[in-house]
Image (cartoon, rainbow, N blue to C red):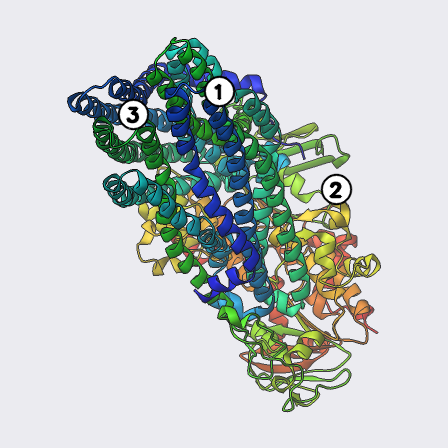
Amino acid sequence: MRYLWWLARRQPWRVLRGSLLGTAWMVGLSVRPYLIARAVDDGLRARDTRALALWIAAIVVAGVGLSYLGIMRHRTMTFLREDAKARSAEVLLRHLSRVGAVLPRRVGAGEVSTIGGSDIDWTAQVLTLTGPGVGAVVAYGVIAVVLWSISPMLALCVLLGVPVVGLVVGPLLRRLERVESAYRRQQGALTARSGDIVAGLRVLAGVGGRDLFARRYATRSQQLRAEGYRVGAVNSWIDAAIVAIPGLFLAAVVWLTARMAVTGDVSIGELVAVYGYVATLIVPVWFLLEGSYQLIRGRVAARRITDLLTVTPDDVGGPGRRWPAYVPEAGLPASVPLARRPGDLTAPDGPADLHDPLTGLTVRAGLLTGVAADDPAAAVALADRLGRYVASEATWGGVPLSGIALDEVRARILVADHDSYLFAGTLRDILRAGADDDDERIDAALRTASAQDIVDALPGGLDTPVDARARTLSGGQRQRIRLARALRTEPEVLILVDPTSAVDAHTEARVAERLRAARAGRTTVVIAASPLLLGRADLVAHLSAGRITATGSHTDLLEGDPGYRHLVARGSEDPDIAQPTDTEEAYR
Amino acid sequence: MSRLPVADRGTVRRALRDMISRHRRAVGFVLVLHSAAAVAGLAPPWLLGTIVDRVTAGAGVATVDRLALAIAGCVLVSALLSRYAQYAGHRFGERAVAELREEFVSRTLGLPVSVVERAGSGDLATRSSVDVATVGTTVRDVVPTIVIATVQLTLLFGAVFLLHPLLGLAGLAGLPSIVAVTRWYLRRASSAYLTEGAAAAELTETLTTTAEGARTVEALRLTDDRIQHGTTRITRVWRARRATLALRTVFFSVVEASYPLPVAMVLLVGGFLLSRDMLSLGAVVAAALYLQQAIDPLDRLLQWTEQAQRGFASYARVLGVGLVPPEPPGTTASSRGERLVVCGARFSYSDGPDVLHGIDLEVQPGERLAIVGPSGAGKSTLARLLAGIDAPRHGVVSIGGCPVTDLDPAERRRRIALVTQEHHVFIGSVRDNLSFAAPDASDDQMRAALVTVGADWYAELPEGLDTALGDGARQLGAAEAQQLALARLVLADPHTLILDEATAALDPSTARRTERALAAVLVGRTVIAIAHRLNTAHDADRVAVLADGRITEIGSHDELVAAGGAYAALWRSWHTPADEHRR
């Protein structure tokens, strides 16, 4: 609620303008019945041509005026809503961009997509209440006064009757919506099926089974059709009721008024006007019913937005980063200004050794260190500790890593993990990784990652747009782009996790050689099991059962560590592909 | 990339006519019922006019009672008629939409894979989701609304004409400006709304992907970049919404200012006729009320026209899929033997330069051939030729003496399976995901296949083969998905397997597990493996080195190493410490 209030308070003038225009427009709606009534009474019935012409001119002018009011109201309300949407989107965007690694653990991507796709809209929709909502109340009052001047008894009937009709029809409409939305869900599931078939078309082409899928789809489609019949049977009754109930009410009012016309209590023109008033009164009553429903949904939506906005970043066991959360008046946490706080430890000024006490690994400054791990999960955990994605005892130049401001750690140590995210954009956008455009450095990084052929093969070169996750590229291509991006940022310490596992041996050999040259003199860790990469490292460590069991050159380890030899040369000793396994024989 | 075709206007019109004539009786029934309902709906204003006349003439309460009761009766009859009209219309819509989407899916399934790949699967995906849905809503919701509104308008104006032809003509005042502004609006609206929708979708995607890639944002310190990126998206949405708002501003202000014109003109002409006693006061009142009543259907008609136009455009794109010639059925039902022979094969992608320059290759049944080579050498293209997905531009690829592309597609798939790094888990149960590879397989065979490929996660599934997978149900990891794909192969039991870097997209530990599972599938079959790991090549019977679209070396691993060519150099750097490179 505070969030909604905050959104409205950001634009007080629009809210004011919206409510004024909304009121004027709604009141204006009842002007035409009045004018028609006067034209009938004073002009036609009295056979007064001048009066008739006057009232007709008034009808035309009022029509133009009403259309002006209507469109200005619509424009103001649209701006009001769009402003709220843009504001919500911006607050969310800034927050999502800052929360960092903790986010995927706390919130599913689907949830963010719902919030971004519909909750923002629902929240903004509530602001409609400020315009037509206010207008509806005033318009209702004005019509009440006019009717009262015609006949108090009639006024009572109409003023109470219309809301009652609204209250009867409202739930019917909700029900209509519910039945519809159940049908739409089923329809969505069917659409997902056809999307699924499109996505899996290549699999079906590879293995077969097209007919089966066509039949399965047809069965589901027929089920949906049958469901559609059922929905249609119910909904058409509801629809008929929604039209019939107000129609019957109108008939009753006409009957009442006509009897009064017979007795001379109301004039003929007033009879016609009442008919029109009842019809126009539907509009404000409708707005109010709709508005209350929007308020309920909007509050739920706003709650979901603020829930997301209160997810705080994880400082992984030490001093964190600058964290300006905004808008405390919208019920969001206040900012915690943070650069370097007094208790922070000073990071080493220049290149320094990294040490992980848990495994006993020491990464020498300025060297290319290879780490071969028996258990890939242990290798990933090691990278997380060295890059402080988890709290640990790791040190950097003797200083505990968790005592250094996280901003500084992130700026100087880069962990390039296997599935680091590729955002949608042109290849250049991806590769420049937030830095200024510099094709020369991008080209150098591409060359090192042996990824130039990917760019050359694309129609627009570096300017070719790529989907999120770069789905259009192959696994090996994606991996090389990721590597190029990591190299391009030229971090002081670069930790690469399996940088070439999906790349063919020819290319891998090239990458290994170039990587070594490109990172000469800078601290680099390569976690991999490939002899091509490890063979180029200054120093190789073998991580086995959670500890570093041997350190030395690739050659030394090949000769002195049988476990290492087995690990990196598994192709020649591990008969994976050559012989059938036991299970296979059991199956045959 | 060549896009999928879009049907032209004539084709769409023909298809619409066909659809209507197929459901001729239903359409006629719906129209008659709606007209009857609208006639009943016209009575109240006319009755009110009658009341006005009678009361003016000094009629009593009894007359008023009778007429008021008649109004109520008309309301009820109209509601009842429109209920049945709507229901019948709804059934027609459902039937038509079901026909349409089933036709679309079966056409899609019949598309040759190469066409889909060249057009990009994104285009087809949009057609299957957005376009089919748009046509669906149009047929189900928009068309009925438009039909009802048109029927009502026709009758309302008809009624005014019946009251007096001159009144009718007066009622048409205001129409010219509405027609003109509507044409103006429709020419611009669709593309403006599509731009708006695309901008909004882009913003949502930016928010979603920023959340998905939050760790990368933190690691590469992309915060400012993401904010900047998102801010331009927000600006774009704002601008697109302003553009549509500008269109609406012109459209609705002209239209709404035009609405009172018919009423005003009818009163004016009515006053003139009344002064000559050419018609009654009640008739003028009724005509004014009819025209006031016409505003509502007119408004609905105008609001939905844009939607209808968009539905028409979507329908053209849906029909476009049917214009692609389906995959040709093979000329030969089966072939003798399993010997795979490639002879002088050349290939180029759509008039581009040749990717393969005359490949000659022979693979014996049961042989294991590894193909290695740098990226871009044409390995994947060769795999596609071997699997019969593409036909060589020159030369021939044959199995058992019969060109693979002449084989019936279903038969070909049964015999030669292509496994790529792409895997896809279909929405549905585990059984659904397996059975299409071998429709006759029993549950036991499926379970055995899962065991064979090392899918030990299967044991933990709560409902066994009936466990639902995908979207909103259990999500499989990359390795699990690939194992499922391999289990399919075990069931399909092809004699020849072509592996195109089947495990390259997986992380190394997963790849290792999957390769072990793969080994179980390969036994006793002809295997052609495109490999990026040299250990795979080492284990094969023969190795072919592909470079620049040519086979440069071929032979057993030992022969190639002994020959001392490019392969031997690579093998040495892979397998022995690279002393020569060290300082």
Mark 1, Cα crowd under 10 Å, few <14 / some 14-19 / many 20+, is many
Amino acid, disc 1:
Met
Amino acid, disc 2:
Pro
In-image side of A147 versus A395 (left or right): left
Quadrant the C terminus of chain B occupies:
bottom right
Q: Which residue is mark 1?
A: B265
Q: Which residue is mark 3?
A: B82
Quadrant the N terminus of chain B occupies:
top right
The chain letter for the residue carrying disc 2 is A
Q: Are marks 1 and 3 in contact (CB under 8 Å)?
A: no
Q: Which residue is mark 2?
A: A459
The chain letter for the residue carrying disc 1 is B
Instruction: Using the rendered image of the protein, determine whether residue A588 is visible from the camera's viewpoint.
Output: no
Q: Are marks 1 and 2 in contact (CB under 8 Å)?
A: no
In this picture, is A459 found above or below A324? Answer: above
Which circle's residue, 1 or 3, is located before the other in the chain?
3
Give the total of numbered labels. 3
Camera-side residue of B544 and B484? B484
Q: Position of residue A36 (x, y in %)?
A: 41, 28
The answer for how far apart the CA atoms under marks 1 and 3 are is 31 Å
Mark 3, Cα crowd under 10 Å, few <14 / some 14-19 / many 20+, is many
Residue depth check, mark 3 versus mark 2: number of the one nearer the observer: 3
